[in-house]
Amino acid sequence: MTTAPNAAPEGAAFERRASLVADLRFVLLAALALAAFPFVLHPIGGYAGLATQILITSIAAVAFNLLLGYAGMLSYGQAMFYGGGGYVAAILLLRAMPQHPNLWLAVLGATLVTAIMALLVGAVTVRLYGIYFALLTLAFAQMVFFIVEQAKDWTNGDDGLQSIPNALLPIGPWNVDLTVGLPPVDLGPFGNLGDIKLWYILAAIALIAVLLFTRLLIRSQFGEVLTAIRENEERSVMVGFSAPLYRLAAFGIAGALTGLAGALRACYDGTVAVESLSIERSGQFVVYTVVGGVQTLVSPVVGTALIMYLENVLSGKTPAWRLIEGIIFVAVIVFLPRGVLGTLLNQREKNPRSIFRRALRPRTEEPEPLLRPNVEGRRAGPLSIIETSKLGKLFGHFAANHDIDFQVDPAELRAVIGPNGAGKTTFFNLLAGTIAPTSGTINYKGRDVSRVSGTERVHLGIAKAFQTASLYPDQTVRQNCRLAALARVQGPFALQVLRRSTRLDDVDALAERAMDRLELAAVADVRAGDLSHGDKKRLDIAIALATQPQILLLDEPVAGMSKDEARKTEGLIRRLSTEMTVLVIEHDMEMVMGISDTITVLHQGTVLATGTPAEIRANATVQEAYLGGHTEEEFAGA
Amino acid sequence: MEAVIEALLNGLVQGLIYVAIAVGLTIIFGTLRLVNFAHGAFYAIGAYVGLVVAQHVGFVPGLIAAPLAVAVFAVLLDRLVLQYFYEKTPTAQILVTFGIALVVEETLRLIFGGTTQQFPTPAALQGAVSLGPIAYPAYRLVFAVGVLIMIGLVWLFLVRTNYGLVVRAGVRDRIMVQLLGGNIRQASTVVFALGAAVAGLVGAAASPIYSIDPSTGFLFLVPSFVVVVVGGLGSFWGAVLGGLLIGELQSLTTLVYAPAANVIIYICMALVLLFRPQGLLGESEVIRQS
């Protein structure tokens, strides 16, 4: 399939149009569903006001799902933003503008304040995971609860704030009264049109706007990276994404949306109380979202509707309604990990869309030579591209590396060998920046990078393939490479919450190029988790390559491969070494002796010898270390 | 001065309850890698079982029945639900155990009603003991000594028995223990039941001091998790140190500025997590695995 060079922009335009159509269709469907919602709720015992409350509250659940479902962050403190938004809106309406209450300003102000709050809390929490993250967010929520409860002058303490002016919404020259209902028309079993107040319509518009925003966000460049970080943070950091910044941004956005929901709810109810800040409230968002299903955009809305409906209908009929709610929650986690809606939609979701996407994006068969050959560096001659001095790493009292002095010439293919436990992987981790040295320095192109993070080093040109391939198992081979290329093109962080990465041409070209280099084009559309062992190892190298490195660190690239695969991979590595500096750890001596320009032998954490393959082969100390004093003949014969 | 001594003693009693719950949490995490949000429910179940048996039979039979009932419940829970979550993410574990805690709380509410109930102090231990300048309730002193002995027994179990050896090895390296043929499955069940029983026993024994209601489980669970994090997840002595620290901190804060007593522990935890994320006595390897 050869495509004309000008096909790409046309394809992009086509895709833009197609996604716009899909977005419009989504909004239309959502609007229809929300228009029908109160009339579905009425015959089964829900009142019109409940519909409004459900819509508003579900905004907070959608925001929570952004954290849990897409970023993998289980926050147990979302109530601080929900209740916080409610209090800010209430205080703004009651104190700041008692004469001319303006709902717009109150809600906007609350959203801004909670966004700032979320960024501040996030700044100290996003580096923690799992139980630690959950507990620390819970701790902050408890602190906010305490402050609000104690600041009685502003918040009225345990009594909360009442009589929040919530009727008038200024639109242009008019003051729209939101408590007015639609014209009264009797709809028989479906209730009365007049029961629907304008507040419901405002809530519906807000929910649709939030859903559309979230929809764009999760398909955007930002959402793509956020999901990638959840799937494999180790890899994401080592292709050059700043995981903490992405998580912070997600936390901030979710906090702002939760604050928006809390402000709307306080205004709608006309009251706000400390319960809105409680642990129980935080737990409710967890329940709504998990019951509906994570990782599907609208499922938290369904979960919220289901639970709030049960709560309101059952609470009048049986004291066991909370028990029923708890049982539903546990049953969903155990039996339907995708949630109620997620399970129903799962079959429909997957296949059509991925086929659709593949057909849309034309592939360029002949990629541009984007990988700049490292000619300048090579000519620099005596200057080494990377060197270490007295480099050491202590784990407790154990010196995994010590006093390593090491230089690599830009044009070299250097092998690092040594018996198991010699400290080879630790040394590579120090070079790549995944761990920090306890002593000594690392100089890269004349600059001390000892304290530079791994993520930043990727952007300086140091990339690493892992000993055990570190991939995005649920993404295709192409998408694996695209993510690495995206990091190279956009940098460690980009708040591109609306634009898709497909609009960046370089990304595709870089990814295609990397796949071609490792001969992975044939499996480009295969899920990485389904690849053979050899292909996984090669994909890991392709990912590193897609970041356009100047130094490529390969940790046992052919380990576990069959002989044929190993020789093939060896050839690919040799070709890569004509364009960049390659450092390789390997136990396959045939390969090491065959392709290396120079070999460094590590033993007991430090350099034992450095030399050409012939020199190393003849070195008596090396034989001692490897073979415990056996003769060269035995070594050669082994 | 009297007030300070009394606050210190109150803090000790409160702290020992946290220690008893936190020790269970921490050894269960160590062996099973399970983050158990349902652990507070064991405390609450123990308290209610103890209450019912005390009302119909007697106080001491209540103290025996409570840990037994809770241990049986814990083993059932482990077999029916939790064992499928051992290898899942901490997030999935938190969610499912949180759900179980909700179910237990609501079941208790359904059976016993939502009102607060007070365990009567056994007649033999009513009254106060004179401790220098102050008189302190006799039951609280006996309770404190009893919990200390119990914690000592749990520690002996950990260092003297083969199960304990598996537990301690499991905290270090769970996979290696399995590879060496340690029966981690059986040890897990024993540890889970033990951790639960300890919480259940303390729940029954503490009820004459702290009144109970269905939400008691959560009320003690959250501070106990704070204790575990402050002390170091997976560390026995961390749980002991953390529990006493948090109990005293809360009690002394009550003396100075009562409303802040509930928030001070969160501030304390936030500081620990920021400056020593592995906890006061925790090992840094543990934090990476969770």
Image: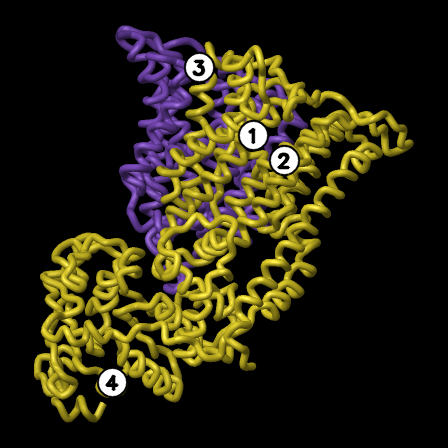
Chain colours: A yellow, B purple
Q: Secondary structure at mark 2?
A: helix
Q: What crowding class fits label 1: few (fewer than 14 Cα within 10 Å), some (14-19), or many (20 or more)?
A: some
Q: Is residue A255 above or below residue A560?
A: above
Which chain is home to disc 3?
A
Q: Is residue A145 above or below residue A460?
A: above
Asked whether the viewer can see residue A323, the reply is no
Give the camera-side residue of A594 and B206: A594
The lab-note entry on whether marks 2 and 4 share a chain reads: yes
The lab-note entry on whether marks 4 and 1 share a chain reads: yes
Q: At x 45% / y 79%, what residue is drawn?
A: A366
Q: Is residue B178 left or right of A200 when viewed as pictured?
A: left
Q: Secondary structure at mark 3?
A: helix
Q: At x 61% / y 63%, what residue is drawn?
A: A14
Residue position for label 3: A150
Find residue A595 and name its label: 4
Residue position for label 1: A281
**Where does the N terminus of chain A fall, quadrant-wise?**
bottom right
